[in-house]
Amino acid sequence: MNGGRAVVEALRRAGVTRAFGVPGESFLAVLDAFYEAPLTFVSTRHEGGAAFMASGYAKTSGEIGVCMGTRAVGASNMAIGIHTARQDSTAMLAIAGQVNRDFLGREAFQELDLVAVFSRYCKWAVQIEDAARVPEQMARAIRIATTGRPGPVFVALPEDMLRDTADMRFEDVRAVAPPPPDPSALDEALAALLAAERPLVLAGGGVVTSPGGCDALVRFAEAAELPVQVAWRRHDAFPNDHRLFLGMTGLGAASVVFDRLAAADVVLAVGTRFQEITTRGYSLPRRDARVYQVDIEPAVLGAAMPITLGIVADAGVALRALAARLPAPVPGVAARRARNEADRAAFVEATTHRPAAVPNGCVDPGAVVAAMQRLLPPEAIVATDAGNFYGWLARYYRFRKPRTFVGPTSGAMGYGLPAAIGAKLARPDVPVVAWAGDGGFLMTMTELETAVRTGANVVALVFDNARYGTIRMHQERVYPGRVVATDLSTPDLAKAAEAFGAAGFRVSSDAEIEDALAAALAAGRPAVIHVPIDPEWLSVAQAR
């Protein structure tokens, strides 16, 4: 077969069922192979949208996300989604067509040294120049993307190579199994947790991506009576309505969440890389705390901040092994339960929404969260863009099941809508709601056409304060009264949605939210709800 058909066959053998991208002449041989393959190519309106859709698809399906673009221009547009996948630890395969091999190095039309550029973004970047090596290199790319800490891999495909034919030998593309955790390290960590005055488990994305990892965390926490916090934008690593859940640390968190993390004398960090936002600028956990970090990727251990001991292991495997090592009876349970009940009560008090006064014609974002909590089932998926509007979701919404949250730890604007589309295509059986600000939404609003065309019936809630709100907040803090570049104007998004073939709604008070959301969920097509908010209320942290 030719190189293009081998690329698609390698994807099929890896269990890939869908790819996202903008078609280009440099990889027509790949596109042609989709014609008869049991895979779907979702044509998007922009390669950045394709990469974000692949991310949302991967996070909710557990399948590797695949995005495609042509040569330098398409690959460059995918870069924002590739970077997001790296910071989010999302398995992604980014594929780009390349100029003919004998044109390389001549600054040919749309030529770029793609491997040199994307090797800095990705776990691995390769240009396949021999058609016979497509099965081998594609298998390696998928294996690297899915082994250890998941992440993006970039593959460049010269146009003429894709037309070459060769005898193809395909190989197994399963991920490499991680080593079992060191028993002595587990014993040390467990002994420290059970002897601590204020122990805490901090769970990250590695718990979500580990098979059975979230269930294993619940069982271990319950058996040992250990409280759990989750890393920033890892809401769904532990059920938020559980009596042992003490919140997500990071932007939007209530102060009691940071206070509890600061109070911890022993921390078991599972599947988290101690990201900057999670740790409040690498200041938490405190320096005199004993920190045991469990991660599938050895390079992550101790990389962001000092730790007591690193344990190389899959999160779920380690948690199940820890639970099996618990003594009977477990010491200190009664004392920990009393402290945990008090901590949980303080957390619930600080994160329960109370109606706030807002100007006429505006909506309290917390009222939107309350309506979602009433209307959405536990399995509903929420995808969020980047921006301060997210703080209300972070503080008040209770995620109850794994793989129900999709959001960029990279802070990439424009993520919410396309990621929600990817999530809906992965899980058409559940409601999918996107949160976005007016700034981020208009960056990728064109993908609403993709949603209509593919039947991805997402509901997009767009919080409109007619400004780049997060930047305005920092601008007012650092340069008060000197407003530059942060004011915007917003079109009527309800009318714009209707022009795309979607349903459009606009609300102007808290009382209208629930009816609009119910109608949008029942619309049978994608829907946009335009939500005006007070432009002076720049973050959830501002008192009302």
Image: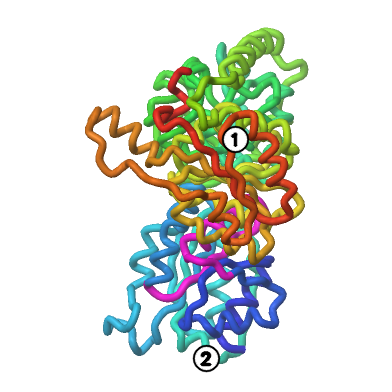
Badge 1 element:
helix
Residue 148, position in %: x, y?
Answer: 55, 51
Residue at (51%, 61%) from the top-left corner?
446
Can residue 191 be seen by looking at this rendering?
A: no
Magenta highlight range: 43-72
Query: Hey, which quadrant is residue 325 in on the image?
Result: top right
Residue at (45%, 23%) from the top-left corner?
541
Circle number at residue 422? none
Residue 412, position in %: x, y?
Answer: 44, 48
Q: Amino acid at mark 2?
A: Asp
Query: Which of 217/191 is in front?
Result: 217
Q: Is residue 445 above or below residue 367?
A: below
Q: Which residue is mark 2?
A: 164
In whole angstroms, how far apart are the C-alphas of marks 2 and 1?
Answer: 47 Å
Let me know if residue 117 is in the magenta part: no
Q: Which residue is mark 1?
A: 235
Query: Hey, which quadrant is residue 506 in on the image?
Result: top right
Residue 137 located left or right of residue 505: left
Residue at (53%, 24%) from the top-left corner?
267
Sequence-earlier tag: 2 or 1: 2
Residue at (67%, 58%) from the top-left corner?
456
Crowd rating for badge 2 (residues with CA inside 10 Å; few <14, some 14–19, many 20+) = some
Let me know if residue 45 is in the magenta part: yes
Badge 2 element:
loop
Q: Amino acid at mark 1?
A: His
Q: Is residue 494 above or below residue 374?
A: below
Query: Which of 288/467 is in front?
Result: 467
